[in-house]
Image (cartoon, rainbow, N blue to C red):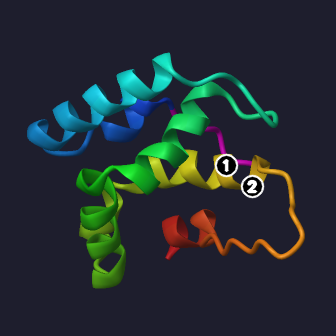
Amino acid sequence: MKLQSPSLVVAFKDLSHFRRQILAHNAIRLLKNSTDANGLSKEEIVTIKLYVSCFFLYIPLNEALRSEQYEQIKTWLPYLKLFHNAIYKLPERAGVHCHVWDIPSLITN
């Protein structure tokens, strides 16, 4: 099932105002310095870059996922959809493995 990718604005809309401001600042900086590559849009590239470079994103996201509490995970679902679609567009490389959770099963469970 192909998921419609939300925009970064939609992906961050349910986060706290403080976290949204920091992520928006970082996203704007990254968008200015990114170009489309490997079939990924600028937003998809920034989605991946934010996860690997911005502790205001990956720490609370990983805490929510580890909690296994749907209410904590729910605010991150739009971002996870965008991240999921971006990761699956990356070209395969020998010896490089990436496991991405199945987002549709997270939504339905």
Q: Amino acid at mark 1?
A: Asn
* Amino acid type at image mark 2: Tyr
Element type at mark 1: helix
Q: Tag count in the figure?
A: 2
Residue 16: image location, x then y, percent: 13, 44
Q: Is residue 19 magenta?
A: no
Question: Which residue is disc 2 drawn over?
Answer: 88
What is the x, y in percent for residue 106? Answer: 51, 71
Residue 85 circle label: 1
Label placed on residue 95? none
Quarter of the image containing the N terminus?
bottom right
What residue do we see at 34% from left, 71% from top? 62
Comparing 67 with 47, the one in front is 47
* Residue that protrudes farthest toward the left in the picture: 18
The residue located at (54%, 48%) in the rendering is: 48
Q: CA distance from mark 2 to mark 1?
A: 5 Å
Residue at x-position 58% and y-position 64%: 103
Q: Which residues are magenta?
A: 1-6
Residue occupying the point 62% across, 55% down: 84
* Place of residue 3 in the rendered image (x, y in percent of width and height, measured from the top left): 67, 47
Q: Using the image as rendered, state which of residue 46 and residue 68 is in the foreground.
A: 46
Q: Are marks 2 and 1 in contact (CB under 8 Å)?
A: yes
